[in-house]
Amino acid sequence: MTAALEQALSPNIPNPTHELVQVVRGRRSGLAISVAIHSTALGPAAGGCRIAHYSDPAAAVTDALRLAVAMTEKNALAGLEHGGAKAVVALPTPARPADAERTALLHDLGDVIESLGGRYITGPDMGSSPADMSVIGERTTHVCCRPVEDGGSGDSSVHTARGTLAALGAVAEEAFGSPELAGRTFGVIGLGAVGAHVARLLHREGARLVVTDVNPAAHALADELGARWVDPAAALTTEVDILVPAALGGLLTARSVPLLRCAAVAGPANNQLDEPATAGLLAARGLLWAPDVVVSAGGVIHATGVELRHESEERLTERVNGIADTLRQVFQAARPHRTTPAIAAGLLAEQRVRRGRPHPASAAARPLVSRPAGPVDPEPPTTHATTPVRTTPQEH
């Protein structure tokens, strides 16, 4: 399976720079768990755990690789002492495991994370929740965003939304000359956990809203906020000031960019560009795009601040609001060089990563491997050793 996966991935990831890529089959669940650690130059890698259906194993690994790179950039640009990583569980069908099957899967995940000796700290992502983090936490201490009653920082979606609101002020300032949101029209695509919070915050600021979601039940929120509802198929062609992607990624493509009727695009959805070249298509149309790795950083800033740095809420609010300053820095860096904000953000992140040093448990880049998961002892460990192992540091 290793050779087949490497062959399938090579067109999409021709020169992987990741420190570690593993495909592990859970010994309880039997499901494939892909873990990609991109960098620990700034500290232990942090990134969510995605549980989703994939058409083939290579697609899941590709997703993990790309998401891990994005987390390195996100954490670096947010000023966090963390690298980037991602765990992806490939479900064979769209149905999500429940009850004992879900517990088995989450325990498998915990074992995989524990085996990495502190190099990777996980949290919720698409398909996983704070409650799931508590179950993973039965097998490893390297987990964030457990419910508050379990000693964690809780649901990070509200803090991601707060960071998005700060970012939208910087985008409005760049696009229209003023950070004022009142009176501006925002098209929010996706009213899930984060998107619903963003819509409410924008409504509170006096913004006009156009919203959509694939779930018809979200229409109730539109009514609550006095927002105009549009069909998901019409969301991209509806005239707004700023488009706010808050659902799945890959929305911005060579086909969709010409359809946009807005001045700017900025939202918390991850991986909004289907490929890096799409950033140039947006710029060619004169559309401002705020890199999602900056906009969506509020959740990881708050979670790691509460659980790992033990920062005060006042300090955390300052950090989350600082997303606006980071975006301004990105826009300022892009302007004189006539480059895109995507390229400017990548360069700024790369500069910070290069100044860091690998985490003590880092290893040189490893080939893709596949192996069974978990320690020999089936019972949860009573202690969690994180003794560094001897390794060869990787340059960044």
Image (cartoon, grey):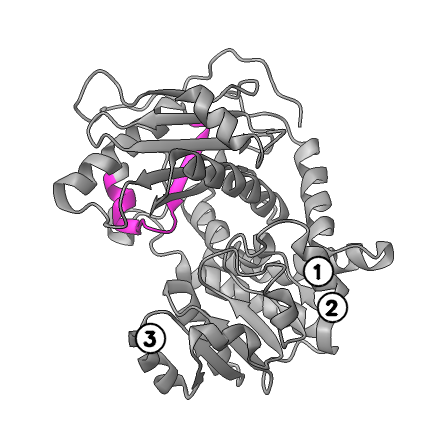
Marks 3 and 2 sit apart, C-alpha to C-alpha, by 32 Å
Amino acid found under the numbered disc labelled 3: Ala
The front one of 150 and 145 is 145
**Circle nearer the N terminus (3, 2):** 3
Using the image, tell me which numbered label, if any, was put on residue 218.
Answer: 3
Residue at point 44% right, 73% down?
232
Question: Does the segment drawn in magenta span residue 67?
Answer: no
Q: Is residue 200 visible?
A: no
**Residue 196's spot in the image, x, y percent?**
40, 71
Residue at point 41% right, 38% down?
60
When the figure is inspected, residue 119 is found, relative to residue 260, above or below; the finding is above
The front one of 312 and 351 is 351
Quarter of image, res 230:
bottom left
When the figure is inspected, residue 182 is found, relative to residue 135, above or below; the finding is below
Q: Secondary structure at mark 3?
A: helix
Image quadrant in which the N terminus is located: top left
Q: Secondary structure at mark 2?
A: loop
Amino acid found under the numbered disc labelled 1: Leu
Marks 3 and 1 sit apart, C-alpha to C-alpha, by 31 Å
Quarter of image, res 105:
top left
Quarter of image, res 261:
bottom right
Q: Is residue 286 left or right of residue 187?
A: right
Residue labelled with disc 2: 285
Amino acid found under the numbered disc labelled 2: Arg
When the figure is inspected, residue 82 is found, relative to residue 311, above or below; the finding is above
Question: Does the segment drawn in magenta span residue 121?
Answer: yes
Q: How many marks?
A: 3
